[in-house]
Image (spheres, helix red, strand yellow):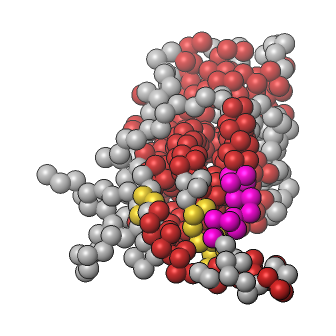
Amino acid sequence: MTPPVAGDLGLLAPVWAGTPVADRTDDRAVVQRLLDVEHAWLAVCVEVGLAPEAALEGLDQGAGVFAAESYDGPSLARRCPMGGNPLIPLLADLRQQLGDHPAASQVHAGATSQDVLDTALMLLAADVLDAALPELDAALAALVDLAERHRDTIAVARSLGQPSLPTTFGLRAAGWLAGLSAATDELARARAALPLQWGGAAGTRANLVTRLASAGLTVTADEGTALLAGRLALRDVPPWHTDRQVVLRLATAVAGVLAALGTIAADVVTASRPEIGELREPAAPGRGGSSAMPHKRNPVLSVLLRSAALQAPGLLATVALAAGSAVDERPDGAWHAEWSTVRDLLRLLGGAAPKAAELLGGLEVDPAALRANLDRALPDLLSEKRAALPPGQRDQPDALGAPEDYLGQAHELTDRILREHRARAAERPARPAPDRRQHP
């Protein structure tokens, strides 16, 4: 029997629908990350002596009451507005499921909703970025190959949509490489900077300090939160309840990658028009078809990358506005505005990165079409060169020469961009191969 359509499957979001990021960012994943944070904190409390060892007995991370599958998602969603965040109803259900287990009185002790939710979103971001970065590495490798293979492939440079000068396709690909390489480095830095959030009710950790002192423990609050950060593989930093630069940096890095991909996609869409015919997207069964025009081979990968790039600035603006509106010790609405916005950005990134790798890895370049378009633009394509000649030479036969003679530093600039990219790449830590699983 065919299962009913239910939940957010991405039917109106083809950038990320059907990709692994759908699983990594759905509501089940959010609940799981909230539970992971609560379990990690409970484990730290047991480790330092704030909670008895019995509080962890029979309770494993991601299993039993600490598994998202143990909770009724629609019920959590219906009750979420009552407290303004999803952790409040989830905690109520968690404690109910724990019953008389010793953990029931220990879970969440000394924490606040913002601690757990902010930290869970950092874990969610880590999941997405860890999957996206290898895909972007693959896209960068494909761009290196394009720039090298087409270093000498002559092409028409276009400015404001019109033919301007001779160039090489290798330099165009190198320009794509420069933008995406820099943006990917920023994203990697944002990933490395993802922090723990743990400040208690008002960012002072007063409850934790009091509990540690009352228990006669010598461990400090800083040491306890450092243990938590270590368990979650996040940076240990002071509380940032109203310092939202962490979130803004993440969103900016994501939007930067999507912008770089959008530039590439826009060029591919233009160059793949039949009347230009310089580029073609890689073919795949069932992709690029039209519901009404069977002859069409639509550049759907590029279209979806452009879609992601066009959506990102509005989402980034929301994050920036929220960061500038964070007040007192807990933002009243600005914090709440971040949640779905950041998730939308992460989904766009998670869907766009593998599409970029596929597009660039299989992009078909037609040197003959590049040359034909260049020849059609002559001699106007050399009008700048003509204007630079002394007046007495401008009208001499063969004064303009061949377009290959007016490439300036196209080759040198291509080589320089490649060298600089390789130097940066050599300093990057090794990343795993891309995950090419399809969302079921």
Residue 9 quadrant: bottom left
Dominant secondary-structure state across the stretch colored magenta? helix
Which residue reaches farthest left?
1
Instruction: Say above or below: 330 vs 333.
Output: above
Q: Is residue 224 magenta?
A: no
Where in the figure is residue 195, as x and y percent of width and height?
A: 73, 37
Q: Is residue 409 magenta?
A: yes
Q: Residue at x 65, y 16 (%)?
A: 46
Which residue reaches farthest front?
397
Q: Is residue 221 visible?
A: yes
Instruction: Say above or below: 298 vs 251.
Output: below
Q: Residue at x 52, y 31 (%)?
A: 432
Numbered marks: total:
0
Q: Is 233 left, or right, of 367 in this rendering?
A: right
Tell me the magenta residue range: 402-414
Residue 402 quadrant: bottom right
Where in the figure is residue 188, as x and y percent of width and height?
A: 68, 41
Q: Is 350 left, or right, of 274 in this rendering?
A: right
Instruction: Say above or below: 25 vs 259.
Output: above
Looking at the picture, tell me which residue is in the foreground, 194 or 58: 194
Where in the figure is residue 329, as x and y percent of width and height?
A: 83, 51
Q: Residue at x 64, y 54 (%)?
A: 174
Where in the figure is residue 378, as x and y percent of width and height?
A: 59, 81
Looking at the picture, tell me which residue is in the foreground, 12 or 323: 12
Q: Is residue 34 visible?
A: no
Q: Residue at x 37, y 53 (%)?
A: 18
Looking at the picture, tell me which residue is in the foreground, 36 or 17: 17
